[in-house]
Image: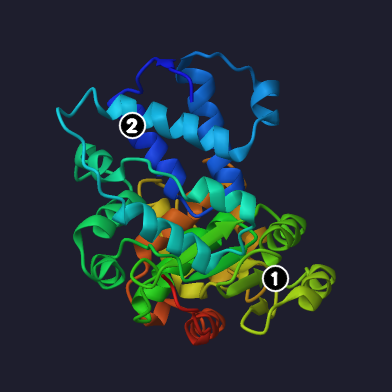
Amino acid sequence: MEKIKIKPLTKEQLIISADRLTRFKDPESKYTRVFKDIILSNLITPKYNKKELDKISYAAMGTIAERIINMSLQSYFDKTDDDYLINQRLYDYEKSIFNIDKETEILLKNKINYSSLIKLFDDNVPQNLKWLKTLKNSPNPNEESHENGYKFPVTKLVICEGITEEILLPEFGRLLNYDFDKNGIQVISAGGKNQVVKTFYKFAQNIKIPVFVLLDSDARENYNEIVPKLKEKDKIHILAHGEFEDNLPVKLIEKTLRYATENISYPADFSTIPEFGRVHYLEEFFKNRGSHEFKKAEFAALVKKNITGIEDISTEFQVIIGELKDLQPVDIM
């Protein structure tokens, strides 16, 4: 390749790039987006615009981005490592969880100087970057990651409707001796039942690891759209009734509401929490007390603070964690 001129990536940009390249995401979209962003922002000569980048080969794109990253690292180290063990292990990992075509393989077979890059990480980097360091330093990175709860490598994918599930399912798992981070469980809240179908379809064709889909009880039509595309190792669970919050134990909801309103002078009557329709009850509760509207993410965070034991986990959620635990993972790396 011709001589290039770059604006070096800052330390922060290098760490962000490593983070984005090692998140759980389809490899082709992940690598092309990160590499294009680096080239557009940091390549001075030759200059490419977005349309031109969309037309160049993956081999050329990967080579340019790789050189920008490695040349940037030379600003921080007198001598950079010439060790590509991390690269090989990342390649093996992505290949073990995704079906990858030949063009995308070109992007994965890069020589980014990860061995030097990880020296820039401090103790506050995201879990995937802590895992990245084990790929260099550990003879058994999967075992070390499990012990430290780094959540990588990802072994199972959970697709659910909303943020409540994303916040509370890992906490239920922890109390039921199934730590999501230690076992590499990735939870994606799709943002509604129709989005669950779209998200599942996006992963269904190119993912090898088991997928667990969780739907509210009113999503029977969506359930029927997903079932034909489930792999043998996948699982779908539709709630027996209502939404996720409707299946929280009454005592846990009461405990959470008392906590949320402890500094409000006038009392509330918690005896009216219904057996069904608890989401509607919560909406009315917050509206009538003049605090603020019912916000699921905030309420889920409060619920998490008030969970003290297995008695706060309904039978429905215990079944869900059991089903997820029973899914058989594929061999990773």
Residue 139 in sight: yes
Residue 131 place in picture, x, y as percent: 30, 57
Q: Residue at x 60, y 48 (%)?
A: 28
Tag 1–tag 2 contact (CB < 8 Å): no
Cα distance in 3D space between marks 1 and 2: 52 Å
Q: Amino acid at mark 1?
A: Gly
The tag on residue 280 is none
Position of residue 16 in the picture relative to residue 230 (left or right): left
Q: Which residue is mark 2?
A: 70
Q: Amino acid at mark 2?
A: Asn
Q: Residue at x 28, y 59 (%)?
A: 135
The answer to which quarter of the image holds residue 220 is bottom right
Position of residue 123 in the picture relative to residue 15 (left or right): left
- Scheme of image coloration: rainbow
Crowd band around label 2 with a 10 angstrom C-alpha radius: few (<14), some (14–19), many (20+): many
Position of residue 110 in the picture relative to residue 276 (left or right): left
Residue 5 place in picture, x, y as percent: 41, 14
Crowd band around label 1 with a 10 angstrom C-alpha radius: few (<14), some (14–19), many (20+): some
Residue 257 in sight: no
Position of residue 269 in the picture relative to residue 205 (left or right): left
Q: Residue at x 56, y 53 (%)?
A: 105
**Secondary structure category for the residue under label 1:** loop
Quadrant showing the C terminus: bottom left
Please state which of residues 58 and 3 is positioned toward the viewer in this rendering. Answer: 3
Q: Nearer the viewer, mark 1 or mark 2?
A: 2
Please state which of residues 119 and 72 is positioned toward the viewer in this rendering. Answer: 72
Work out whether 234 lies above or below 2.
below
| Mark closer to the chain start, 1 or 2 | 2
The tag on residue 242 is 1
